[in-house]
Amino acid sequence: MSLIEIKNLTLGYDKHIVLKNININIEENDFICIVGPNGSGKSTLVKGILGLIKPIKGKVIYNGLKQNFIGYMPQETKVDSNFPASVMEIVLSGTLNSLGFKSFYSKKEKDVAINNLKLLGIEKLKNKSFCDLSGGQRQKVLLARSLCATSKLLILDEPSNNLDSKSKKELYETIGELNRKNGITIIMITHDLDHNNLIGNKILSLREDDIFFGSVDDFIRRVHND
Amino acid sequence: MINEIIEMFSYSFMVRAFVVGLLISLCASLIGVSLVLRRDSMIGDGLSHVGFGAFAFASIFGFAPLEFSIPIVIIVSFLILRLNDNNKIHGDSMIALISAASLAIGTFAISVAGVNTDINNFLFGSVLAINQTDVIVSVILSIIVIVLYVFSYNKIFALTFDEKFAKSIGINTNLYNMIFASLCSIVVVLGMRLMGALLISSLIIFPTLSSMQILKKFKSVVISSTIISMLSFVVGLVISYLQATPTGATIVIVNLAVFILLKFVSYFIKNK
C-alpha cells in the first residue's frame, strides 16, 4: 500500500489554480526529488500534502501516517539572525505533535531530541545558540527538528539553499543515509540538480502542463530524447 | 532615602500603582519577547492607540474604562490579525492607519462631548488614575495572562520561531495567534492607566531588546526580560516619587538606560 495517494489534486490560492489534476502515489521508502522552474507549483504541492492549504479539488490519502506527523523543513526559514534560541530549544519543538494536550516536555521528548541530534552528528551543538551556527549547521538543526516530528516521512523544501558546495554535499549525504539506513521516505524540492547529479529514486518534474513522475532513469532518458 | 521610600508606601495610591505596575511589567515583558522576535513590535503601539480611543468613549458615556476597553481592543487585535493574513494592505500601514484613526476619533469625541477629561492622563498615564477596582481587575487578568503564557510557552516558542513548521505539525496557529493577540490587548489596556497610550508599548519592547544584547537562548531572554522589566519599573517608580517626575516617562528612561548599558556590555564581550 502506498504511504500517500494523491488523487486528482488541484491546488491554488483563492481562485488562481497553480496545479491541476495531480495523481501520484508515494511508496514507503521512496526518495522523490521535485524539480521544475520557479512558480511551477513545487512548494504549493508540498503545502497541499502537509495540509497547509486546502485542496480546490481532489484529495490526499494518508496510509498509516497522520498528517501532522510529517517532518517538514520549510524553505529558508525566515529566522532573524539574532533570534535567541538554543539548538535544543529548536529541536525539541519538533516533538510538539506528540505532546498532545500536555504543555511541557518530558524525558521522552528530550530523549527523542537527543537521539536525532546524535543521528545527525550534531549532539555537541545542543547548547549552542542558533545564531552562532554556520549555514550548514543550521540546516542540520532544522533537519533534526523535522526528524523529531516524524518516523516515516520527511518533506524538505530546498534544504541546500544558500549553502556552499561542501556543506551541500554533506547535507545530501546525510539525507540519503536517512533514506537508506533509517528507512525514512523523503520528498525533496530541489533546484540545483543537473541531469548528471541526480539523487533519490524518483523524480517529479513540474513544468506547466507537462508533468512527469517516474524513476530517475526514465527521467534521464526522457531528457536526452527531448 | 529609606524613610522616603517607606513614606511612599504609606500612600494607598502608590501601593496600588506598585502592585498594578509590577504585574503589568511582568506580563508586558513576557508578551514582548514574541512580539519583538516576530517583528510585530508596532502592534503593541497600535493597540495602545485603540485603547486611547476606547478610554475616551468610556469616559464620555460613563462606562467602566477597563471593562469597556479590553473587549474593544481584543476585537481590533483580531481584525489586525485577519487583515495581516489577507495581505490586502501591508501590516505596518494597516497598524499605522488604525492607530492614527483611533487617536483622532478619541480626541475628537472628547472635545465634541465636552467631557472634563484630562487627555494628558490617557496619553502619558498617571499613578493617581488607578483605583481599587483597577487593582482587582489587573490582578485577576495578570494572573490569567501569566498562567496562559506558562502553559502555552512551548507552543509560543514554536510559533515565534517558525510559524510554518508549527502549523505543519498540527499546532492550531490561528487559535494561538488569537490567544496571543488577546493577551497582548489585555496587557496594553491594563498598562495604559499607568504608562499612558504613548508609552505602554515601550514596556513591551525594551526589556526584550535589552536582554537580547547579551543572551542567546529563548528561555533566558524570557526570564531576563521579566527581571529587567520589573526592576526598571520599581526603580522608575521610586525615582519619580522622590524627584516628582512623570512616572511613565521615568520608567521608560530607566529602561532606556538599561538598554544602553547592556549594549555597551555586549560590545565589550564581542571585542574582548
Image: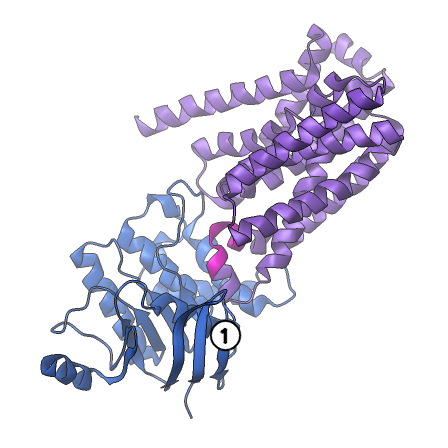
Q: Residue furthest bottom?
A: A1
Q: Main secondary structure of the magenta part?
A: helix
Is disc 1 surrounded by few (<14), some (14 to 19) or many (20+) residues within 10 Å?
many
Q: Which residue lies at the image location 37% right of the left edge and 44% below the top edge?
A: A131
Asked which quadrant contains residue B54, the reply is: top right
B66 with respect to B39 (left or right): right
Asked which quadrant contains residue A166, the reply is: bottom left
B24 with respect to B39 (left or right): right
A49 with respect to B155 (left or right): left
Q: Magenta stretch?
A: B158-164
Instruction: From the rendered image, report the letter of the chain displayed in blue.
Output: A
Q: Is residue A111 visible?
A: yes
B122 with respect to B264 (left or right): right
Q: Chain of mark 1?
A: A
Magenta-span inclusion, residue A27: no
Quarter of the rendering occupied by the N terminus of chain B:
top right
Quarter of the rendering occupied by the C terminus of chain B:
top left
Q: Which residue lies at the image location 34% right of the left edge and 83% below the top edge?
A: A29
Specify the amino acid type for callout 1. Pro
Specify how the rendered protein is coloured: by chain
Measured from the top left, where is residue A98 in percent x and y?
55, 69
Above or below residue A28? Residue A133 is: above
Instruction: From the rendered image, report the letter of the chain displayed in purple.
Output: B
Seen from the viewer's position, the closer of residues A68 and A53 is A53
Magenta-span inclusion, residue B160: yes
Q: Which residue lies at the image location 75% right of the left edge and 19% below the top edge?
A: B119
Q: Is residue B225 visible?
A: no
Above or below residue A39? Residue A186 is: below
Seen from the viewer's position, the closer of residues A202 and B220 is A202
Q: Which residue lies at the image location 49% right of the left edge and 85% below the top edge?
A: A64
In this figure, which residue is indicated by the disc labeled 1? A55
Measured from the top left, where is residue B204 in percent x and y?
60, 33
